[in-house]
Amino acid sequence: MPHNIQESIDLCHQVRRDIVRMVHAVNSGHPGGSLGCTEYFVALYKHIMTHDPKSFDMDGIGEDLFFLSNGHISPVYYSVLARSGYFDVDELHTFRKIDTRLQGHPTTHEGLPGVRIASGSLGQGLSVAIGAALAKKRNQDNKLVFSLHGDGELQEGQIWEAAMYAGSKKVDNLIATIDANGRQIDGDTEDVLDLGNIGEKFAAFGWEVVHLAAGNELKAVIDGLKRAIDLSGKGKPVVMVMRTEMGSGVDFMTGTHKWHGVAPNDEQLADALAQLPETIGDY
């Protein structure tokens, strides 16, 4: 596990290389949101969560838990899991291939270490995270539950049923993060279905809200998650509204929704890799 910020910044570069190479290799996958959430995953797994990759089980008793709700950004999830020691980095070669454990959306029946729910059918992850958080309370387990959601995912009604429940039942060992990049598969969120003020909505449902303007700056993400942790355990669930840039790190993938689910061709891959230093070593 990295011991300093520079090691984690180097890891972010390498994870981004993994992402674009994985989706290019099979001409399939979701690079945009994966690139945009790289700092969040590195911060969470390398600086924030208490977890043991070598003794993974589905219960996670005595460990912090993470649930990815917007499962289409699996490339960043798989890369960070592998580079955190959950499975061999070389397995990234199998992404989206026949009989792989690294499906396009995370699944559980293949037994991939690090993954506790199948996700990608948007809107469901917050409900699962609440259930896990309540289980920890019943077990007198003082560790936290983290979840990640896309802002476009907030257009799903189940999210708000879950948000209402968590606020009403004071599920205060839960920290949800919203990847507020303002884009989804069909365009900008404000054009598809305007989300309004996300923080005010969650606050109205009884949540504490942390606003993070710099979701692609590693130190800022670490600090934002630490602020969220400081607010936990005080009678309210916590949500971090994290502003990111879809496609962050690759200039031609930013400023547009078009790289939500499109793989780069050979020339585009070369361009992307030229922008991303190989800091640790490609798989």
Image: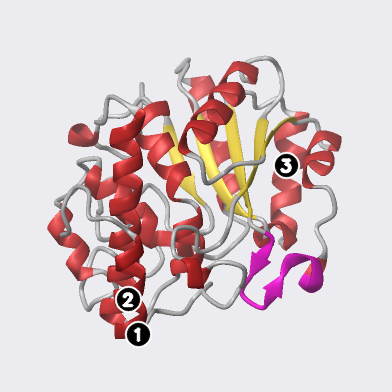
> Which residue does the numbered mark 2 point to in the structure image?
269
Query: Quadrant location of residue 193?
Result: bottom right
Alpha carbon of mark 2 to alpha carbon of mark 3: how far? Answer: 39 Å
Q: Residue at x 37, y 53 (%)?
A: 77
Identify the residue position indicated by label 3 in the image. Answer: 163
- Magenta stretch bounds: 182-192
* Residue 159 image position (x, y, % from top left): 69, 51
- The x, y position of residue 122, in whole percent, is 59, 62
Horizontal and vertical percent position of residue 216: 52, 46
| Residue underneath mark 1 | 265
Q: Residues within 10 Å of mark 1 (few under 14, many from 20)?
A: some
For marks 3 and 1, give the CA distance.
40 Å
Q: Are marks 2 and 1 in contact (CB under 8 Å)?
A: yes
Tell me the quarter of the image containing the C terminus: bottom left
**Residue in view at x 35 percent, y 63 percent:** 275
Circle 3 SS class = helix
Judge whether residue 247 can be spotted in this image. yes
